[in-house]
Image (cartoon, helix red, strand yellow):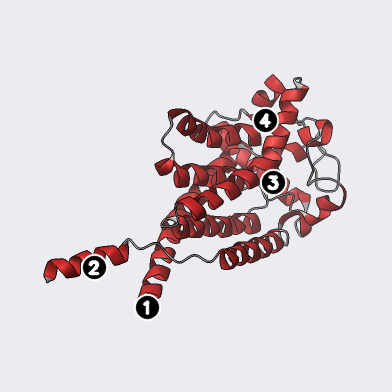
């Protein structure tokens, strides 16, 4: 009798969660809309460029202190290879949406048991990024030499704004989008946080060696993209990793609590 109860309990715990695609779509859509609105209320919408420039100086000082202020050197090695830079402009502007959405869809349809947990971790991590955007507006390298509304116009800046100079699929720092998008939302780097989230979420389910290698390379390629396009300092990726760590812990506990509440009601 006791063994039968244990078996029933194990079956209950292994039961796949009941997922509703419309509810999931609504949840993620509303969350991202609120996130985007809140994100753009801070930084370049309300902060003087001098403050964002001062914070950029702090980050550069930290990198110099550890002997790794290398972003300008990395960009200078590749800046004359126009097709190469255009590729990374497109990579930077598109893959963080495409790959992250693809990972969510894969987990939803193929791994529904773990989908709720990783969805909550991703949303928690994204929400935590707002703390950095609100409290630490940071001028990215590409704006140090920019003489527009949000740039510092430093003649000594060694950086090139690759999207402005060579183009990509679209730009968030020109035309109407320049005023709608937070130009100083650089710390932490959500590009890197989402890329590493994809790696952690998908790694247990990828068996082929070449696929596992490509998955492992994705966060590293994202780190290269954010640096070579001068959209981030490498230390922004450290901030992205930190919020992912906090988001992993917090999101896992939130989902465990939500699962417990759901099983309690049933």
Depth check, mark 2 against mark 1: the one in front is 2
Spatial separation of the CA atoms under disc 2 and disc 1:
15 Å
Spatial separation of the CA atoms under disc 1 and disc 3:
54 Å
In this view of the protein, can residue 161 be seen by the observer? no
Q: Residue at x 73, y 59 (%)?
A: 40
Front in this rendered view, residue 251 or 17: 17
28 sits to left or right of 180: left
Quadrant of the image containing the C terminus: bottom left
Q: Which x, y percent locates residue 196?
A: 51, 43
Q: Tag 1 or tag 2, which sits nearer the N-term? A: 2
Q: Which x, y percent locates residue 255?
A: 43, 64
Q: Tag 2 or tag 4, which sits nearer the N-term? A: 2
The answer to whether 132 is drawn above or below residue 76 in the figure is: below
- Identify the residue under disc 3: 54
238 sits to left or right of 60: left
Q: Residue at x 64, y 41 (%)?
A: 95
Quarter assignment of residue 37: bottom right
Q: Determine contact: label 2, label 1, CB under 8 Å.
A: no
How many marks can you see? 4
Depth check, mark 4 against mark 2: the one in front is 2
Neighbourhood count class around disc 3 (C-alpha, 10 Å): few under 14, some 14–19, many 20 upward? some
Q: Tag 4 or tag 1, which sits nearer the N-term? A: 4
Spatial separation of the CA atoms under disc 4 and disc 3:
22 Å
In this view of the protein, can residue 180 be seen by the observer? yes
Q: Which mark is residue 266?
A: 1
- Identify the residue under disc 2: 8
Neighbourhood count class around disc 2 (C-alpha, 10 Å): few under 14, some 14–19, many 20 upward? few
266 sits to left or right of 189: left
- Identify the residue under disc 4: 228
Query: Which SS class for mark 4?
Result: helix
């Amino acid at each position: 009798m006791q063994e039968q109860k244990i078996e029933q309990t194990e079956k209950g715990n292994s039961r796949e969660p009941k997922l509703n695609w419309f509810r999931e779509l609504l949840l993620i859509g509303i969350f991202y809309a609120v996130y985007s609105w809140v994100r753009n209320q801070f930084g370049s919408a309300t902060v003087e460029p001098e403050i964002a420039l001062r914070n950029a100086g702090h980050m550069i000082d930290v990198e110099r202190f550890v002997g790794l202020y290398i972003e300008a050197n990395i960009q200078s090695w590749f800046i004359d290879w126009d097709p190469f830079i255009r590729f990374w402009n497109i990579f930077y502007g598109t893959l963080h949406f495409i790959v992250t959405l693809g990972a969510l869809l894969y987990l939803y349809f193929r791994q529904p048991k773990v989908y709720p947990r990783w969805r909550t971790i991703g949303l928690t991590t994204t929400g935590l990024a707002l703390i950095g955007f609100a409290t630490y507006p940071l001028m990215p390298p590409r704006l140090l030499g920019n003489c527009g509304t949000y740039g510092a116009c430093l003649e000594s800046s060694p950086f090139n704004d690759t999207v402005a100079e060579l183009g990509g699929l679209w730009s968030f720092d020109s035309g109407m989008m320049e005023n709608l998008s937070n130009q100083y939302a650089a710390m932490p780097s959500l590009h890197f946080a989402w890329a590493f989230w994809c790696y952690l979420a998908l790694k247990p389910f990828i068996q082929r060696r070449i696929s596992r290698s490509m998955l492992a390379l994705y966060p590293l390629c994202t780190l290269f993209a954010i640096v070579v396009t001068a959209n981030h300092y490498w230390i922004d990726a450290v901030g992205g990793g930190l919020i992912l760590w906090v988001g992993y812990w917090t999101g896992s506990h939130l989902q465990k609590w939500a699962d417990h509440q759901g099983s309690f009601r049933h």
